[in-house]
Image: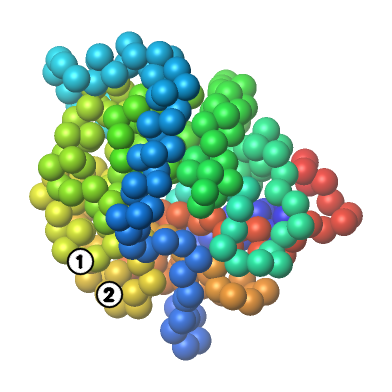
Amino acid sequence: MSFSVRFLLMCVLIAGVVSFTPAVPRLNVKSTQLNAIGALARKAKEAEVKKWIEEGGREEVKGLLGDMEGGESEESEVAGVVKEAIHKRRRTLSIVAEYKRKFKADGYVNEIFEPNLMSPLFREFGASACAVMTDKRVGGCDYTDLKTITEEQEKARGDVPGPLPVICSDMIVMDEQIARAKINGAQAVLLQLGLLNEDVVKGMMEKAARIGLETIIQANTEEEVKTAISLNAKIIKVNSIEDIEVKESWRTLMGDSVTAIADVLANDNKQLEEVEEAWKLRDAGYQAVWVSDCLYKSGNDPTEHAGA
């Protein structure tokens, strides 16, 4: 697994400084993630959060929930930590490396290293930010893993490379999850327009800003991209298996002030064709790619260890 992480991160980083036009057919990428989350999934997540509240979890974030409800938004002060980390000079592509323990496709890896071992790999091999899939049902992680990674990244403060900003990638449906992300050290949260309506997303953006969190708005369709723009989203993540031409047209809609991220989904093979897709997305104007399952495709090399 360490070989896959290192090789893919380094290949995509090279794409940020080398111009390349691949003479290969377009990739037919198969999704390994949920692109449309149904009402049942939302209800299941709400039930999970409510159970956590009933077990006394709300007490640990009670103060933050109060801060989220009132006062002026700190948006102008917060903007920058995540956005600046991934929005670099023109034709430079950043990587958001997502940590998870569970995958949609079988046979990629036999074992996932613990978060305290994977976290420095992301930093040392060139990722610009780290996301933690804290939805246990989808990604197999929880907020304990988020805290482990944020604490490990903080240990690199003053070093080169320094700590990566960490994003909470949960299926957020309630304010308590935003507060929980903050208390466990995240710098940003992911909000999904396919899951929440426009008014709810707008309210959550404001509440997150009040406690010093940036928001990344996920859009699955052109309509959702336009909604994210109307909400003045600073960072928009495109989660779609549409062709590059479609994603390019969506990028044009966003304008230059928006930091655009595109998912790179894992192809169902052992090749690293995802690197070519990342190059194409860079050429289409995206500042970053969000990589998850494809980081772990080759499995563990028995001659390597977590520090390799």
Residue 301: image location, x then y, percent? 82, 58
Helix, strand, or loop for circle 2?
Answer: helix
Q: Residues within 10 Å of mark 1 (few under 14, many from 20)?
A: some
Q: Residue furthest right?
A: 303
Question: What distance separates the C-alpha of mark 1 from that of mark 2?
Answer: 9 Å
Would you say residue 12 is visible in this rendering?
Answer: yes
User: Residue at (40%, 34%) from the top-left corner?
Assistant: 49
For badge 2, the amino acid type reads Val
Three-letter residue code for mark 1: Glu
Q: Residues within 10 Å of mark 2 (few under 14, many from 20)?
A: some
User: Does residue 129 appear in this view?
Assistant: no
> Residue 255's spot in the image, x, y percent?
18, 56
**111 is higher (above) or lower (below) than 36:** above
Residue at image position (59%, 75%) is: 268
Q: Nearer the viewer, mark 1 or mark 2?
A: 1
Q: Nearer the viewer, residue 19 or 41?
A: 41
Q: Which residue is tagged 2?
A: 246
Count of numbered tags: 2
Marks 1/2 in contact by CB < 8 Å: the verdict is yes
Quadrant location of residue 233?
A: top left
Q: Nearer the viewer, residue 139 or 235?
A: 139
| Residue ID at (20%, 42%) | 201
Specify whether 227 is left or right of 117: left
Seen at 19% across and 20% down, the residue is 69
Which element carries disc 1, helix, strand or loop?
Answer: helix
User: Residue 96: x percent and y percent?
Assistant: 48, 48
User: Where in the figure is residue 275, as x and y percent of width and height?
Assistant: 54, 68
User: Looking at the rendered structure, which numbered label has been put on residue 222?
Assistant: 1
Q: Quadrant of the N terminus?
A: bottom right
Among the 4 quarters of the image, the one containing residue 122: top right
Mark 1 or mark 2: name the one nearer the start of the chain: 1
